[in-house]
Amino acid sequence: MNPETAAAFSLLSAQAVRTRAQRMLALGLEGRLPNFGVDLSLLDATAERVIATTRKTYPSLDIPFHSRWRHFIVDGVDRYGAIADKARWPDREARARAAIDLAVISVFLDAGAGTQWRYADTISGKRIGRSEGLALASLEMFARGAFSSNPADPLRVDAAVLAQVSPEQLSEGFQVTGDNPLVGIEGRAALLQALGTIVAGNPSVFARNDGPRPGGLFDQLAALAESRKIAAPDILSELLRQLGPIWPSRITLGGVPLGDCWRHPAMTTSDATSGLVPLHKLSQWLAYSLIEPLQQAGFTVTEIDGLTGLAEYRNGGLFVDTGVLALRDESQSMRQHDVGSALVVEWRALTISLLDQLALAIQEKLNMDARELPLAKILEGGSWAAGRAIARERRLNGVPPIRVTSDGTVF
């Protein structure tokens, strides 16, 4: 393996994300970042806000993991669970493949909806926006067999169908109209098409016990498990290696596509990865979302705290709105920023490292350790909800404090 390829693979891990995010925070605390100042004295108040938010939803602090599965629960009813419980599965492995099929497409379609889009839910009668609306739209498409090549087996996602998904099909499924616009619909369709191509072209990973489908990842992960145990960071690394090529062409190193990885001038190193900041938001969101299907199939997932917090605008907005992060140039809050800009990369990396700091503060306040209250539960309780709530308090439509141009493939 040439040095550049080896360097590229070193960035495809949760540890690489955490290490570089910590370096970004250290630079911020030294006042050496171009876009943000950091004030950790305000982290205590931020922790109190997150605890208060968590107790409203989970008074007993019995918090589930942060994952896509939470968004399929509406008015206390687990929509996917009800569908899956009625289906006839030959074994629990088949059920796990279907769940992973759904998790993969739903997470990849969950990259920001904009402020105007809403999904009209036929069951509740509600018009639901943002991640929750995107989740229900993807679930409805999945449940009616929109991604299956077999009408008799609708609860599956086949590679051949994904490869042919069009923006028009997604627009119909997501109820997109001129009055109900969804940002990045073309990017989402292209992402699913690329997913279908990758899955179809790699049967040794995705078609071990069935036709090629994203849910074939179950068999790949099961093969990697030792004594039916697998570490969460290993799930992420496998996702990044197997699905990395589906992302739009941004940065490649040694022939390896780096996905959600960006450049920042302050992140200097002595090797080929100098200037690169891996974040892997959607892939980590997916890794969190694969934990429960694996557990339900009888596997133990370890080292869940080895994954990082998610570098997206609700967690990041929480730190800006509470003053932990402050723009050096306040006028930047009024401008639109490209997702690859140094300002956004800096903000996202700082968010990851500050979530680790926030978790420690919350655990100390609640007299709980990381085993009792892991980061995945703090995110769910938690930081994401608190970020949304404070955004609604401060701005019309709850828009984030920093405006990012989305193409439907990042967050």
Image (tube, rainbow, N blue to C red):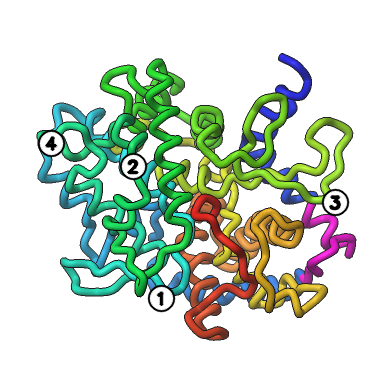
Say what secondary structure mark 4 lies in: loop
**Residue at x 71%, y 58% (from the top left corner):** 350
- Tell me if residue 297 can be seen: no
Of badges 2 and 1, nearer the viewer stands 2
Residue 56 numbered tag: 1
**Residue at x 55%, y 34% (from the top left corner):** 244
Q: Earlier in the sequence, mark 2 or mark 1?
A: 1
Q: Residue under circle 3? A: 266
Q: Earlier in the sequence, mark 4 or mark 3?
A: 4
Q: Earlier in the sequence, mark 1 or mark 3?
A: 1
**193 and 52: which is toward the camera:** 193
- Tell me if residue 70 can be seen: yes
Residue 143 numbered tag: none
| Residue 129 image point, x, y percent | 37, 69
Of badges 1 and 3, nearer the viewer stands 3
Q: CA distance from mark 1 to mark 4?
A: 43 Å
Q: As displayed, is residue 94 above or below residue 408?
A: above
Q: Residues within 10 Å of mark 2 (few under 14, many from 20)?
A: many
| Residue 356 image point, x, y percent | 65, 55
Q: Earlier in the sequence, mark 2 or mark 3?
A: 2
Q: CA distance from mark 2 to mark 4?
A: 17 Å
> Disc 4, disc 3: CB below 8 Å?
no
Image quarter (top left, top right, bottom left or bottom right) of the N terminus: top right
Q: Residue under circle 2? A: 165
| Residue 162 image point, x, y percent | 34, 37
Q: Mark 3 belongs to which amino acid?
A: Ala
Please state the extent of the stretch shown in magenta in the rendering: 24-39
